[in-house]
Amino acid sequence: MPLDTRIHAAVLTLLLSAVACQATAQDSPLERLRHYVEIDTTNPPGNEARGVAYLANVLDEAGIPYQTAESAPGRGNLWARLEGGELPALVLLHHVDVVPADGDAWTTPPFTAVARDGMLAGRGTLDTKALGIAHLEAFLALHRDGRVLNRDVIFMATADEEAGGRLGAGWLVEHHPESFAGAGFLLNEGGAGIASAHGTRFQVELAQKRPMWLRLVATDRPGHGSSPRPTSAPARLVAALERIRTRPFPPRVVVPVRRMFAGIAAHVGPPWSEPFADLDRAVGDAAFLADLQAAKPHLHALLRNTCSITVLSGSAKINVVPPTASAELDCRILPDEDAAAFRAALEARIADDNIRIEPLLNFAAAASSADTELFRLLERVITRHHPAAPVVPTVAGGFTDSHFFRELGIASYGFAPFVIPESDLGGIHGNDERIGIATFEQGVAIMTEIVRRFAGEDTP
Ligand SMILES: [Zn+2]
């Protein structure tokens, strides 16, 4: 191709991609979701500023003021506030970043939003751009209504959730507390409608296990691999790890987990329904715990503190006994666990003065109550749209950005207003992530109803 033709082609491509990302006021929620999914915000590196630019464009067209801030180059965050009365503000939070996608393992290109068989496929459809667009649509509707609100409503889109949120929600908490000033309530990812062979249930997440990430460092005399001494740093480390592996922490049923298992008992089928409904008895049965860990490790993990051995390092050379060896442990403790007591229990298993513990990450204890006006409103609106689906408060084994806000006393709920078939849950962080178009559109209506009623159109 001659040079000038190539330049023209390049300019045309640029123009087309600019048009593709251009918001127009007439866009439907589905078109907005398609645009948003097609903006590659893979973390790392994130590039959330691209997603923020799109959201800003939509808000500009609607005439809604907003603010943006980058925690690092390209790591965009956005927040916008509709002002209302004195009641505690509601934050609508989602994250702009997505996890990497291996295009070769996908049926469709991950950053092309492909509609097929009533589904929209693309990275971020479930985690968590559909939720972001549902929040955005509710926020735009509230602005269009033009009514007096009883509280502020804040739309917030953040970077870096998939890497722990230190450059996103955590950064806003530290550097821009004005972004959520006056907030008493927050809606975020973490729960959704789940359709199984036994029916549909809506899970609303209100507590999480807390990470207590640690590094164990063993030290001892170095030497030559041909002349082993009675002890060494690697041998000490391996022995301590074996004690941790073979002495699991005792099961303990905390209140929200008991309620969650009772709530999903009818939806899990045999052989789980019966023990889930009588969890306190079931956890006394070692065979039940072993079977549950094998079949449903994410639910087993809610019944005790756990430690996964993940990163190991020792000598770089086969014939050198190193002076130190280390292991990283991904421990997760129950929502109300006493961190000092847990550490003491871990030290009792390590039982070696030549091994020191370095803390890497831990969160304070915090959970949200189901006894709030917002939780009751979620129940009412979900039940109106899905009369057969129970609303189950749940505890998550992993963590989301909600912990940053729960620690500040803001009642935070993990809730996406969509129904996801159990078989599609693997698409979250996996391949062929997709969302049903009909449930997405219904979810936009549900979220809009919730936000409208919570901001003042609800008169109980
Ligand atoms: Zn997510």
Image (cartoon, rainbow, N blue to C red):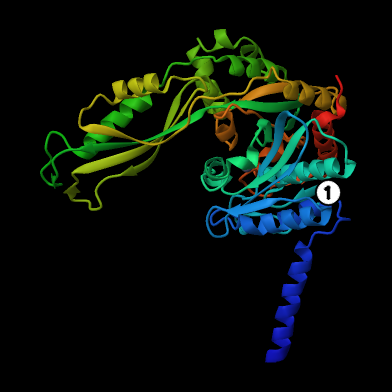
Residue 88, how many percent across, how many down?
70, 28
In the visual, does 356 lie left or right of 39?
Answer: left
In the visual, does 84 lie left or right of 270?
Answer: right
Which quadrant contains ligand 1? top right
Rate crowding at label 1 as few (under 14), some (14 to 19) or many (20 or more) other CA atoms within 10 Å: some
Q: Which residue is mark 1?
A: 29
Above or below residue 157? Residue 153 is above
* Residue 382 placement: quadrant: top right
Residue 223 is at least partly visible in this image: yes
Residue sitting farthest toward the front: 86
Q: Nearer the viewer, residue 269 or 324?
A: 324
Residue beneath the point at 50% across and 29% down: 210
Residue beneath the point at 61% across and 41% down: 178
- Quadrant the N terminus occupies: bottom right
Residue beneath the point at 78% across and 56% down: 60
* Residue 13 placement: quadrant: bottom right
Residue 112, how many percent across, how many down?
73, 59
Residue 441 is at least partly visible in this image: no
Amino acid carrying label 1: it is: Pro
